[in-house]
Amino acid sequence: MARFEPLDPAFEARVRASFARQRAMALIGARLGAVRPGEVEIELAYREDLTQQHGFIHGGIVGMIADSASGYAAFSLMPADASVLTVEYKLNLLAPAEGSALIARGRVVRPGRTLVVAEARVAALKGGKEVEIAASLSTLMTLSGRPDAPRAGSGERWAPNPALRRGRRSR
Amino acid sequence: MARFEPLDPAFEARVRASFARQRAMALIGARLGAVRPGEVEIELAYREDLTQQHGFIHGGIVGMIADSASGYAAFSLMPADASVLTVEYKLNLLAPAEGSALIARGRVVRPGRTLVVAEARVAALKGGKEVEIAASLSTLMTLSGRPDAPRAGSGERWAPNPALRRGRRSR
Amino acid sequence: MARFEPLDPAFEARVRASFARQRAMALIGARLGAVRPGEVEIELAYREDLTQQHGFIHGGIVGMIADSASGYAAFSLMPADASVLTVEYKLNLLAPAEGSALIARGRVVRPGRTLVVAEARVAALKGGKEVEIAASLSTLMTLSGRPDAPRAGSGERWAPNPALRRGRRSR
Amino acid sequence: MARFEPLDPAFEARVRASFARQRAMALIGARLGAVRPGEVEIELAYREDLTQQHGFIHGGIVGMIADSASGYAAFSLMPADASVLTVEYKLNLLAPAEGSALIARGRVVRPGRTLVVAEARVAALKGGKEVEIAASLSTLMTLSGRPDAPRAGSGERWAPNPALRRGRRSR
């Protein structure tokens, strides 16, 4: 049972459309799994070209799917006209990322109006069983009034995060 | 001027050989730049297939190069027969990852015997200038007596981290 | 029901004795609550001398009890002759730390042999209800063969963490 | 030489007045050192009542001064009518916090309009020398139009962070 009520009833379609625009997820072969209010799963099949020097999936790629699962968990609770940005994430690698596939499960911890805190767990599928291989804790930001996708034919380009825009000159 | 004395005079060749075995770095087109004792640079040219939904390089990919730069900065100071593993990393995204290329600079903060703390800064090259787009702080682990590369022809497989091996049963 | 089996049947007495030696916990008035295998609670009554500039409990003090709860959750699963050290922690503040008391609940995420990953949630008690005000994710280290308490009358002093001992000279 | 230009010429007085209202800093005996635009120092003399179970200063107290130094480094660059709140921080403990005193040095990494990223280093003074014992990376938030101190005699109470105010109901 979902723990949160979404503001946007079409949250799932909005999450799936945004994920489909993440070219980096296609590059690594990541796919969206379940999408519930405040909870999103991302699956990644093992491929040799995703590995680090010891043949396990690269910790940075584990971070990519943990970050995206957390970001979309947050995005699922946002208003229809908002975008999501990752402020920061912290990832602990718990065990080698080996097995036939990984699954990252992001869930919202605190659905703030501007800042959303989310966590993810990543499991590896090995011999039909799940082994937890990573845990993360992230801060996401809601950008209100700035839809995730440009209007069709508008020629608009998505503009960067005003919250991080430099507030003052450095010398 | 380098701030640390390497234990292994052949540290640079060791770092470059290990990086060359990271298939995930080849997938995203990352290249090793300067390698100094305790300091490693990784460069990444912009490509459309590395982007998130707004056309910037995916935050998870920024994390990948920050993680690798920090890991190899740590590895450069380790003994010749050791491996490096990432325990955890934390990444702050400071600005959109846009521009012609990214450069991640990892440097060791604390070269402990078992645990090494490192940080990275990632800059984007935009119009001939560098803009800092990410900062990270990481914990790496030295696995002593377990060379990064298997001996040629040995058929050996690199074994996972004993420090994270489960110490006790969960129910 | 506890999720882990402790290695040391006397884990609770060991945790309580170590906590009692943490002078800093006495300074802020923190008390140990429930101690289960891999799970430890710390309670803190509101006091004006614990506040930051807006009258809420200082975020650093929230971090203190989250860190200790996580550290003792890890310690509860360690062998009788081991010490625990915090390698790092990351804390998200979710809401103002106001109310009559705080309760930090630490639980082990991954009980590795050397490194243990733990998380904590901190709740504030307000009007008889709990409000989640912080979440953390931590890395702890087992120091084997180095009991937490010096033997009585031994005059021994607890020695620092060899894992972080400098492995090489800096210039 | 300072790296940033403050928006508020009276930044130092504002930082010192706010620090003086942090009761928790008085409790542990922390004092404000140098205050420069984007850079703040906090000093803490060793006291036995600040220690953990092995006689070193508690890691959570190290986190307190790192958090405050980073928060005030951020605050020094904010407009005169703004407050600062810690969104999250991550602290690596590098060596035991022993010695006659600690000094935490916070500095701004990225002075965003809403979100500010800052880092801190904490050193211990031992035998006349500094030993780096902790490193942190933090995210702070500017609350615009909400002065840090209530107007004298106004009876006003500082109101909590609207950015973290719950945006939606949980079930």
Image (spheres, coloured by chain):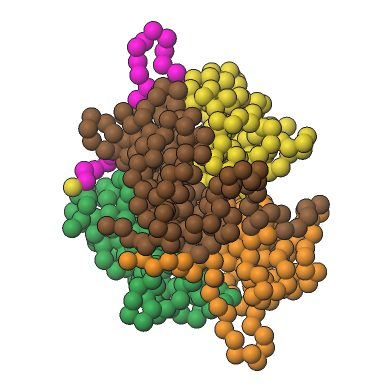
Chain colours: A yellow, B brown, C orange, D green
Residue A17 magenta-drawn?
no
Relative vertical location of residue A159 with respect to residue D21 in this rendering, above or below: above
Residue B62: percent from left, percent from top: 43, 37
Foreground of the two, D142 or A54: A54
Residue C115, quarter of picture: bottom right
Task: Please tell me whether the stretch drawn in magenta is mainly helix, strand or loop.
Answer: loop
In the image, farthest residue toward the bottom = C153
Residue D171: percent from left, percent from top: 67, 35
Relative vertical location of residue B117 with respect to residue A40 in this rendering, above or below: below
Q: Is residue C76 visible in this depiction of the protein?
A: yes
Foreground of the two, B122 or B112: B112
Residue A58: percent from left, percent from top: 55, 39
| Residue at the image position 77 percent from the left and 65 percent from the top | C7
In the image, farthest residue toward the top = A153
Residue A83, quarter of picture: top left
Q: Is residue C12 visible in this depiction of the protein?
A: no
